[in-house]
Amino acid sequence: MMNGFTMKRIDVLDYLRGFALVGIIFINIFQMIPYEHMPQDYGFWSQLEVGVLKLIDYGIYGRFYTIFSFLFGIGFYLFISRAKARGDKAYLLFVRRLLILLVFGFIHSKFQPGEALMLYSILGFLLLPLYNLKPAVNLFLGIVILVLGQSFGALGMSLSMFVLGLWAGQSRIFEQVGQYKKRWIIAQVVSLVLIPFGLWAQYAIIDRTGMLDVGMAAGAIAEDVFYVTSLTLLLQYPFMRKWLMPLNRLGRMALTNYIMQTVIILTLDAVLGLSGRAYYLILAMIAAEILLLQMVISTMWLKRFAMGPLEWIWRLGTYGKIPEHYKSEGKQERQLKNDFQ
């Protein structure tokens, strides 16, 4: 422990990142590949496709990027705090980190219309002056931006989640789940009760005003809180951590897997000619297979390496060299290869 701050990796955040990637691919695949609706005379299969699309509409669309944004805010706090604890130039390192992310995002944006990394890298600079504010102030700011910033669409939603994530990092809520388990359960139950009202508000706003982003924000909040609290509470049980370990491995390599999803989807489209010909149910099956493949590869990769290949490049660019605390062998290496989120 350094300056009262534990260097232990918060595993639940990796599970949540992996969970977010699971939802994101089901949106990205139909943004990249135009699809056809399955004819009704396909019977069971057409009904299944309708069910999948409803699930996407009610439970995934606009939800998982929000979770990812929230995790970005937590990651910001952890990065700065741990860099300060090591005596590094924390703000300079984070600026480099954002600039490298901007490069990744710029390249990715040429292939993926829903790309988020560029937006994250730009908005990330706005977090720097908020780091030293009290948690209560950041919580207030996050809520205000959430309420008032929705007219700015994805920009407002992402920024509000960044700030709320910063508050969550400052409050260390993911490090004290067991201690405050009752509060987590209350948040889970309340969010579950509010989901129907959120969905009603979502479609009422969209139908009456045409403000898609505001409507999606209204529908997403309760579901996102329910998803995050439910998964976090499940992970308090060792057997669930074991069974859900593929999500952890997927999330440990979130940057690599996020960009590789685009590479795989576009490659399959080019080879198989899916655009305008494939039914969405087929695209959903392809997305599920990609996820399974990535979970297997991520698990195998992390048995040999501390991080994914793009994460390594990101780390290298941030420091300008391989940091000394990533070169050492044995116990020190096993400890310090867990020191970043």
Image (cartoon, rainbow, N blue to C red):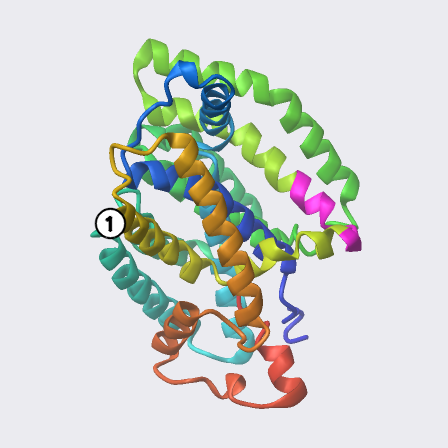
Query: Quick one: 133 or 69, which is closer to the camera?
Result: 69
Query: Quick one: 270 or 64, which is closer to the camera?
Result: 270
Q: Is residue 21 magenta?
A: no
- Location of residue 331 (image quadrant): bottom right
Tell me if residue 104 can be seen: yes
Residue extending farthest to the left is: 110
Measured from the top left, where is residue 252 in percent x and y? 53, 62
Q: Count the marks: how many? A: 1
Query: Quick one: 150 or 50, which is closer to the camera?
Result: 50
Tell me if residue 176 can be seen: no
Measured from the top left, where is residue 166 in percent x and y? 51, 51
| Other-residue count near label 1 (Cα within 10 Å), few / some / many at <14 / 14–19 / ≥20 | few
Measured from the top left, where is residue 123 in percent x and y? 33, 50
| Type of amino acid under label 1 | Ala
Measured from the top left, where is residue 53 in percent x and y? 44, 25
Residue extending farthest to the top is: 208
Q: Residue at x 32, y 40 (%)?
A: 155
Q: Is residue 328 left or right of residue 232?
A: left
Q: Which is the main secondary structure of the residues drawn in magenta?
A: helix
Q: Which residues are magenta?
A: 230-239
Give the residue pinned by disc 1.
270
Q: Residue at x 72, y 44 (%)?
A: 233
User: What is the secondary structure assignment of the residue under circle 1?
Assistant: helix
Query: Quick one: 43 or 237, which is closer to the camera?
Result: 43
Q: Residue at x 37, y 18 (%)?
A: 39
Rendered view: 266 above or below 223: below
Q: Quadrant of the N terminus?
A: bottom right
